[in-house]
Amino acid sequence: MLKKIDHIAIVVKDVDKAVKSYSEMFGFKAGEKRPGPGGEFISMMMAIGDMRVELFQPLKPGSHMRFLEEKGGGLHHISFATDDIIKDLKTLKTQGRKLQNEEPMSLPNGDKVAFVHPSAAENVLIELVQRG
């Protein structure tokens, strides 16, 4: 069952520049940079209160680089926190929704994530995340 919006993800050309802008404009505090799988990107989570924004800077060819090249950056996906990602994926599949991941991926920090295809959600990429 979904609990809340976990974060909003944005693809940027320069993560350091974006962090500076968001920090100056709104007071976001940045976390640590994290490498993406295969070095495709670096990401950084920023927060202010319970609001979180994740920034992605593409480093080499892949889906994030394509997104940056085609759209110039911007909103990439919305992440919803769930307490049972397996159940939510089964429900969506039963409804006939197109999924990018029918099984959740396990991240090194213990989180599990899966993506719902944009065609199933009014052209918005949705990430489901179950925190470790």
Image: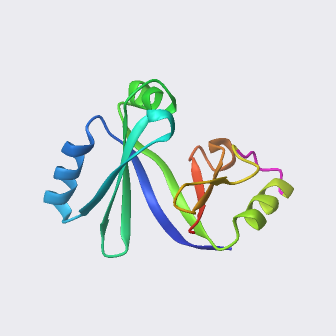
For image coordinates 47% across by 26% down, the residue present is 66
Q: Is residue 78 in the magenta section?
A: no
**Magenta stretch, main secondary structure class:** loop
Residue 37 image position (x, y, % from top left)? 51, 39
Report the number of discs.
0
Q: Quadrant of the C terminus?
A: bottom right
Residue 116 image position (x, y, % from top left)? 66, 49
Residue 11 image position (x, y, % from top left)? 38, 41
Q: Is residue 98 in the magenta section?
A: yes
Which residue is situated farthest in the right direction here? 94
User: Is residue 71 or residue 50 the one in the foreground?
Assistant: 50
User: Is residue 55 or residue 72 the one in the foreground?
Assistant: 55
- Give residue 8's quadrant in the image: bottom left
Indicate left or right for 25 with 110 as reference. Answer: left
Residue 63 image position (x, y, % from top left)? 51, 31
Q: Is residue 23 above or below residue 57?
A: below
For image coordinates 37% across by 30% down, the residue present is 59
Q: Is residue 66 above or below residue 94?
A: above
Indicate left or right for 41 with 98 as reference. Answer: left
- Which stretch appears magenta? 95-99
- Give residue 93's quadrant in the image: bottom right
